[in-house]
Image: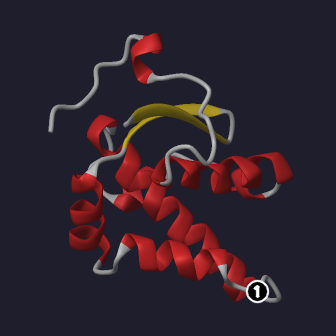
Amino acid sequence: MDSIIKIGGRELPVHASLKTLIDYKSTFGTDLFEDLDKIQNIKSDSIGSLSGVINTSFQIIYILHKPYAKEKTFVEFMDTFEFGVFQSTEAMNELTGVFGLLFPGTKEQSKSPKENKTEAPSD
């Protein structure tokens, strides 16, 4: 599935497929759905918890955006975002809204990459 997500005022084309699960595991060493479950069930009572949610959320976004990314590593990808992306409620809602991509039908995304004339990756 291809879509466009908005994070911190940027539009990122993303691609989700079964290969996404393999890429996530080989890149981060953990299961994408287990990590998603952890961050959805975490209590936000500490900075460490928030930090973990942000890190895992961006790992998922990185993997989804990876077929289109110019950045080769997760660190390079993270370096393209300003710290201010974490300071607004709107940006954090955008961040958590991306998980709808992993569960089609839970949240409609605004546009497909084809509408923006972005070439879809070949799997």
Q: Residue at x 40, y 61 (%)?
A: 75
Can see residue 12? no
The image shows residue 118, relative to residue 109, as above or below, that is: above
Above-or-below relation of 49 to 88: below
Q: Position of residue 36 (x, y in %)?
A: 52, 72
Q: Which residue is at 21% across, 71% downward?
A: 26
58 and 37: which is toward the camera:
37
74 lies left or right of 38: left
SS state under label 1: loop
Left or right placement of residue 37 versus residue 95 in this view: left
**The furthest residue to the front:** 105
What residue is disc 1 on? 43
The amino acid on which the numbered mark 1 sits, given as a three-letter code, is: Lys
Give the total number of marks visible in the rendering: 1
* Residue located 32% across and 46% down the image: 66
* The C terminus, quarter of image: top left
Residue 28 image-quadrant placement: bottom left
Residue 1 x %, y %: 37, 37
